[in-house]
Image: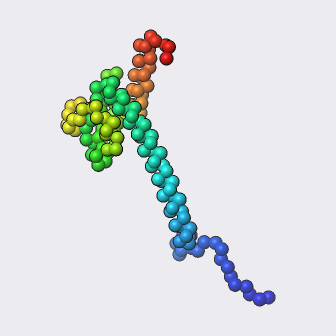
Amino acid sequence: MSASPSRNYGPTWTPGGVPVQPREVLGAAELMMQRLADEHTAALSGVLRERNHLAAWLAALHPSVLAAAPDAGDGWHRLFLRGGGWQFTWPIPPADLALFDHVQRVPANDARARFDGHTAAQKYLRIRTHTAVLCLSDGDTST
């Protein structure tokens, strides 16, 4: 029998037991991961923009202020809104600040921009509770 050349179609292994992939496989994987990350970032930006339109509308209906929020990122602000006796807050990115031109800007040490410590879960419970109260007080069921 003649010996045929040995062909290895599987991955090459490092001394530590990690498979080594050819550069073209890694490059394609990196491109795919970057495309997926870009798509997710665009989707998240769209969702945040929609939320910020709603928050801007609520801020027109309730006492609200905006204060710088450097902990959230460069140029970010935090919306402080009072409704139903509770505080609600949302971080606002620089790209959406124009939606809040009607909201007063205050220094971070302003009493109206003092965070009450609520968690996201507490905020959502406050929203649901306030919504239920508003529905009970609304005698008009035509909508």
Q: Position of residue 112 (x, y in %)?
A: 23, 30
Give the side of residue 74 with respect to residue 20, left or right.
left
Give the side of residue 26 with respect to residue 95, left or right.
right
Image label count: 0
Q: Residue at 54% of width from left, 62% of height from top?
A: 29
Q: Quadrant of residue 136?
A: top left
Give the quadrant of the N terminus. bottom right
Whether residue 87 is visible here, answered yes or no, is no
Q: Residue at 38% of width from left, 36% of height from top?
A: 52
Whether residue 28 is visible here, answered yes or no, is yes
Q: Observer-nearest residue: 100 or 127?
A: 100
Q: Residue at 32% of width from left, 27% of height from top?
A: 60
Q: Residue at 35% of width from left, 32% of height from top?
A: 56
Q: Residue furthest right?
A: 1
Q: Quadrant of residue 109?
A: top left
Q: Residue furthest bottom?
A: 2
Q: Observer-nearest residue: 17 or 121?
A: 121
**Above or below 93: residue 4:** below
**Above or below 133: residue 116:** below
Q: Quadrant of residue 20?
A: bottom right
Instruction: Give the image's coloring scheme.
Output: rainbow
Give the side of residue 71 with respect to residue 47, left or right.
left
Q: Position of residue 133 (x, y in %)?
A: 41, 18
**Above or below 11: residue 54:** above
**Above or below 1: residue 19:** above
Q: Position of residue 104 (x, y in %)?
A: 24, 32
Give the side of residue 137 with respect to residue 97, left or right.
right
